[in-house]
Amino acid sequence: MRVAFLTSTPQNIGGGSGTYVGINTLAAAVRGRGIEVDLIAPAGQWPAFTFQRRWFNEIVRFRDWERYDAVVGFDLDGFRLGVPHIASIKGVIADEARHERGLTRRLLELQAAWECENVHRAERVITTSLYAARRIEQLYGLPETPRVVPEPIDLGAWHAVFDSIAAEPDPARFVVLTVARFYPRKRIDVLLEAARELEDRVRGFELRIVGDGPENQRLRALAPRSARFLGTIPRRALATEYKRCDAFCLPSVQEGFGIVFLEAMAAGRAIVAVSSSAVPEVVPHAVLVTPASPEGLAEALFAVWRDPALRETIARAGAERVRTYDAPRVAEQFLEALALARGCHAGG
């Protein structure tokens, strides 16, 4: 059995972010079920990403698709195909565009139009959360609710890395970690404001920020003395950051899922986030606050610092919950959504 994964998302963590991680983790897990997966992506990355996505979709429609049992197009990819395919929506681009501005917003709106065409052309639509499913219905006018298959995490691989690292939180400090692509919707500026409030209230407070993106320069200009920008780092270095932090915080107001929450859960870390988009679905056990409130975020982080028992309770709940997102389990759900599970068992 053979499946094609079609994606114009950059095949690196710096450009592809969580979408890249999710697609590649899923591909590996599906291969583990005995199915051949061809990951079809652009060879390089153009400076004009939106136009690369269009060009990629124009040229792939001329490929030979007859040898595949299923063709899966992620997000907008596949909107020019003339063969039956499944649209797997990782991020509802029209929803993301609402939180952006300027040229970024205009380009996302153009991509959203292609994603809308993709879900209407597809014979089946899959997405990662109930929130995303409802937004697809509302923003793209899809008559049927997409099937929900969550994002996967390779728990075995992450636990192996965590176990190999001799790092723990420093009891003399309180370290908060965030990991994100720097877009306005991630609200890193709100977290920086909260950090400014906390650095004089919490002994040894430090905010460590992993990531990069269009907002890099603006965010660095806003940073208080307690903030440390680490850029894009490899997995082992990221695992070290997870192990050394006391809490993970991402105040994003728009998440179709949020793979970094799974990583923080796998590391056994307390989570502070906002009650918005898919976040309450993914981390209902976390401390959730009102979106876009630096004061609320600061108070939540202060409460987590002051109460080690609360941190432990959140960490234990997350370590248990993240098992449901382990890649082999999610791969099985994904194959069922593709109506390939029976063939998978027969062939593998």
Image: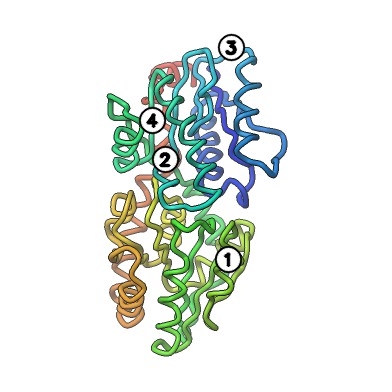
Of residue 231 and residue 292, the one placed in the foreground of this image is 292
Quadrant of the image occupied by residue 220: bottom right
Answer whether labels 2 and 1 touch (C-beta < 8 Å).
no
Nearer to us of marks 3 and 2 is 2
Residue 249 x, y percent position in the rendering: 41, 66
The numbered dot on residue 67 is: 3
Q: Between disc 2 and disc 4, whose residue precedes?
A: 2
State the SS at label 1: loop
Which amino acid does the dot numbered 2 rest on?
A: Ala
State the SS at label 2: helix
Q: Between disc 3 and disc 2, whose residue precedes?
A: 3
The numbered dot on residue 94 is: 2
**Is disc 4 surrounded by few (<14), some (14 to 19) or many (20+) residues within 10 Å?**
many
Q: Between disc 1 and disc 4, whose residue precedes?
A: 4
Answer whether labels 1 and 3 touch (C-beta < 8 Å).
no
**Is disc 3 surrounded by few (<14), some (14 to 19) or many (20+) residues within 10 Å?**
few
State the SS at label 3: loop
Q: Which residue is mark 4?
A: 126
The numbered dot on residue 221 is: none
Of residue 203 and residue 87, the one placed in the foreground of this image is 87
Which amino acid does the dot numbered 1 rest on?
A: Ile
Answer whether labels 1 and 4 touch (C-beta < 8 Å).
no
Residue 40 x, y percent position in the rendering: 62, 28
Nearer to us of marks 2 and 1 is 2
CA gap, disc 1 and disc 4: 36 Å
Q: Which residue is mark 1?
A: 165
Quadrant of the image occupied by residue 276: bottom left
CA gap, disc 3 and disc 2: 33 Å
